[in-house]
Image: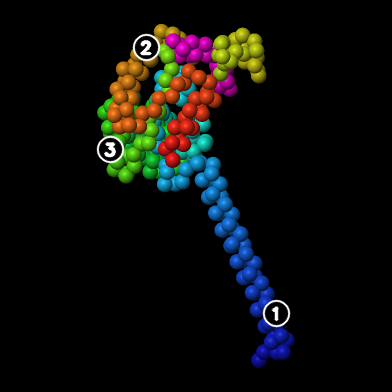
Amino acid sequence: MATSTDSSKGPEQLAHLKSLVAQLQAKIERLESQAKGAVETVKETVGITPAQHLRIILMGPPGAGKGTQAPNIKEKFNVCHLATGDMLREEVSKGTDLGKQAKKIMDAGKLVSDEIMVGMIKNQLDSNKECSLGFILDGFPRTVPQAEKLDAMLEAKDQKLQSAVQLLVDDNLLVSRITGRWIHPASGRSYHTEFNPPKKAGLDDATGEPLVQRSDDNAATLLKRLQTYHSQTDPVAEYYKTKGIWKGVDAAQSPKTVWNSLQKIFDEEK
């Protein structure tokens, strides 16, 4: 049988429960408000809504500045940066079916097929969370057949490229840029005899250790690479010009000026 003491506790317990419910409701509303604010912040930072994904190809010869600009685009627009070499290494290291196929082909000294490369890109778009707002493709496509296969894959996903951006630099300037590069192997710090010289010639500023040049950073090797680049990429650029999405950017300017030009292109895409 309930005592009078038990009866008196009833209203107190009810009031306590109501207080807890009110506190929980207030906390839920606060969390919902914070979540909404976070979404708005992302939209402001990214500059696009999820429906306006940034899907671009970044083309350019060795030394044009793709390695400088791609991280800028990735950070600004929260998209993934898909470089063909990195994708190949990742698939091989993970031991995926595509990775195993690619390794077998590469071990035989042959080129990985277009179908495997497009498959790797599709895998990234399907599974890489960083690709949820779009992507930058770096180093692919290099031929018109590759461009056609990429378009077909994206069309099957009900997507399409927005821009094919080509960084344009005169070959003679590229030779000057690349043959003057010196690197500190341990840290990856890079210098340039003309544009960013070390305090002491041939020595790293931070450690005083010797700087080295990459074996392929010489004029003869670079000119061969440029010939290959032009023979492969010029038709790809024409392909995207016919699609109406090719954009050329003067990359002989300072990195900051090039970045401003790129942002104008992407702003037009919104």
Q: Which residue is mark 1?
A: 12
- What residue type is disc 2 on? Lys
| Residue 180 drawn in magenta | yes
Q: Residue furthest right?
A: 5
- What residue type is disc 3 on? Ala
Label 2: element kind = helix
Q: Is residue 109 visible?
A: no
The mark nearer the N terminus, 3 or 1, is 1
| Residue 252 drawn in magenta | no
Q: CA distance from mark 2 to mark 3?
A: 32 Å
Comparing 248 with 77, the one in front is 248
Q: Which residue is mark 2?
A: 224
Q: Residue at x 52, y 11 (%)?
A: 180
Specify the color scheme.
rainbow
Name the mark nearer the viewer: 2 or 3: 3
Q: Residue at x 32, y 21 (%)?
A: 234
Q: Is residue 229 left or right of residue 26?
A: left
Residues rendered magenta in the picture: 172-189
- What residue type is disc 1 on? Glu
* Rendered image quadrant of residue 150: top left
Give the x, y percent position of residue 58: 41, 28
Label 1, residues with CA under 10 Å away: few <14, some 14-19, many ≥20 = few
Q: Which residue is mark 3?
A: 152
- Location of the C terminus by quadrant is top left
Q: CA distance from mark 3 to mark 1?
A: 68 Å
The mark nearer the N terminus, 2 or 3, is 3
Q: Residue at x 46, y 25 (%)?
A: 66
Q: Residue at x 39, y 41 (%)?
A: 125
